[in-house]
Image (tube, rainbow, N blue to C red):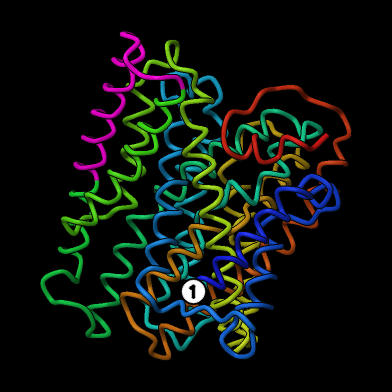
Amino acid sequence: MSIEVLALFAVLVLAWALVSGALQRREVTGPLVFVAAGALLSNDAWGPFPVDVETASVHTLAEIALALVLFGDAVRIDLRNLRRHAGIPTRLLTIGLPLTLALGLGTALLVLTDLPWELALLVAAALAPTDAALSAQVVGDRRVPGRLRVALNVESGLNDGIATPVVTLAVALAATSLGVGSPERSGPGGAVLELGLGVLIGGGLGLLGAWGVTASARRGWAEAGAPPLGTLATGVGAFALAVAVEGNGFVAAFVGGLAFGLVVDRQRSDEQELTELTELGGELMTFVVWFLFGAALVPLALEHLSLATVGYAVLSLTVLRMLPVTLALVGTGLPRRDVLFLGWFGPRGLASVVFALLAIDTLGESEPVTSAVATIATTVMLSVLLHGVTAGPAAARYGVRDDTPVRGRASRLGRQRR
């Protein structure tokens, strides 16, 4: 990323920081703004500030962004207290998510007939997780019943981490099928080794970081404001160390966050302060990714636009999300309106974008790979637009303020909502 592009991006962030509340009240979201800016100003074809997305630094920025989001979301999940609100999210994660993966794979094989099954699996897995940031308007809007906001917040906080191993396996299988990558690191065996290293390193550093932060708080060793640095360093360290030893950095960040949140003393540490720096860093990095998405993947999606890619994108945002959610919630007694609401608000976002960039970086830019990535990009592009403009009107249908607190990034991002 050149210094000119960095200057442009800084101006965009400043502008967003000044008018974000006014824009979001008009259903104009941060992702929509940065995607549009990237597409208009930094595309390779005619943008005045073109971005070379093939550089290693760009891919590293995108991967760090997802790692911070995975770590931060996992830290905020208090596993010991989650059982009080676990009913709906548990069903969405244990029933809805596997059904979404299975239906997504089957539909990709039927609709995207030019893709081998390994890339069809990649498309299905990359589009299975939902995005907490794109759900922010809904999760932060107190007109929506608290049980629904909690369910969406917990689901989006965990499903990208759960989907990561499937994406890793799909990329490894596709690498073997296409004959790319090093033989010793490709294939299912290499993917399992990467995942195992990620779990071990993430769990170890998460426990160590939480123990250190808690011990420091108990003994008064740290200066005011220093513990959030420790939280941020734990997440970045888990990701970086796992990547350094050829493990899966995303799994390491996610598992590290779960371990950190499980062990850290939430009574002695101000939880909001503890995660605020990681939150802000992750939010800034996600804006970078949305900008890059607009600059690189939106033009790719438009170039490969076809009836098949658009059809799959529409199905992914509707039937492939809503049917699994409906089946997962059978027997819960939720009104039909609530089930439809949960089914519709499953936006695809940051994780899907980073998985698409990872696929290009690992598998190259052959025709089947670019077709798969274009399908993912088309789905995300539609999601940014459709979920952004429907959040406010959908919340307004409930009309009754519910002050149930919802912890997490989405709550903070959407706190200006009524």
The outermost residue toward the left is 184
Q: Nearer the viewer, residue 353 or 276?
A: 276
- Magenta region: 199-224
Report the side of 337 relative to 351 (left or right).
Answer: right
Image mark count: 1
Residue on which disc 1 sits:
2
Report the side of 152 relative to 172 (left or right).
Answer: right
Q: Is residue 399 visible?
A: yes
Residue 395 included in the magenta stretch of the image: no
Query: Quarter of the image containing the C terminus?
Result: top right
List x then y, in percent, for residue 279: 52, 39
Q: Is residue 318 visible?
A: no
Residue drawn at 74 percent across, 56 percent down: 388
Residue 1 drawn above or below residue 329? below
Q: Nearer the viewer, residue 180 or 14?
A: 14
Residue drawn at 75 percent across, 22 percent down: 403
| Quarter assignment of residue 214 | top left
